[in-house]
Image (cartoon, rainbow, N blue to C red):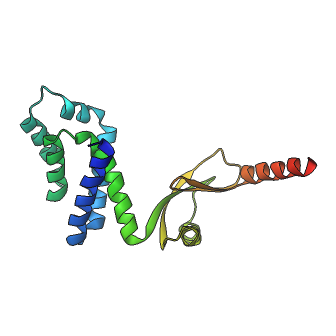
Amino acid sequence: MSREIAAKRYALALFHIAKDNKAIDQLEHELLVVKEVFSSNKELLTVLNHPKVSINSKKTILKDAFASLSQNVVNTLLLLVDRHRINTVSDIADNFVKYANEERGTEDAVVYSVKPLKESELSALSSAFAKKIGKSTLRLQNVVDKDLIGGINIRIGNRIYDGSVSGKLERLERQLVANRS
């Protein structure tokens, strides 16, 4: 079974457990914390994948490191060690977020702007673009991009909505060149 398929299955199983226990938000937060720990501590993954470190030692490391998390998340991590799939943690978290977003009717998006946007501006963007993509809301993350001259860019999944000044100038230039021909 490929890594991607396995990650989707683990994420779906965790999602169903979370849904049954009405703990989708909690498990989503915990999985994102685990993902952050794994991505910021490459040594942890190296130790957990090392063949000379016993499975019991790996499990002890995980139990100690993630003692404050729910038993469902810890048990999943222990199962991943048993099945030699600890490399899928990041993919499991990403897939869980997708399932949680589908359940809530929401989508994650990134807004690139010259300066930090106010909460009211983010809320207006969320409601306007959520309708365009058929979702009830967008969870927006605002990233300040000093390379923008003005305006904003919004990335929703693999789509980019370019409302930047430079994007408008490029479109205007293409239109003028096309009218010349």
Does the image show residue 36? Answer: no
**Rendering quarter of residue 15:** bottom left
The furthest residue to the front? 1
The furthest residue to the right? 180
Question: Residue at (49%, 71%) from the top-left corner?
Answer: 135
Residue 91 place in picture, x, y as percent: 33, 47
Q: In this view, does 50 lie to the left or right of 180?
A: left
Reply above or below: 84 against 8. above
Question: Residue at (18%, 51%) from the top-left corner?
Answer: 76
> Considering depth in this image, is 109 or 40 the residue closer to the camera?
109
Residue 49 place in picture, x, y as percent: 20, 32
Question: Residue at (9%, 36%) from the top-left corner?
Answer: 55
Reply above or below: 84 against 142. above
Q: Quadrant of the N terminus?
A: top left
Residue 180 place in picture, x, y as percent: 93, 48
> Considering depth in this image, is 5 or 88 the residue closer to the camera?
5
Reply above or below: 55 against 17. above
The furthest residue to the left? 56
Q: In this view, does 21 lie to the left or right of 132?
A: left
Reply above or below: 52 against 174. above
> Considering depth in this image, is 20 or 60 the residue closer to the camera?
20
Report the label total: 0
Residue 74 place in picture, x, y as percent: 16, 52
**Rendering quarter of residue 116:** bottom right
Does the image show residue 172? Answer: yes
Question: Residue at (33%, 40%) from the top-left corner?
Answer: 39
**Rendering quarter of residue 18:** bottom left
Q: Is residue 112 left or right of residue 70?
A: right
Q: Is residue 139 left or right of residue 100?
A: right
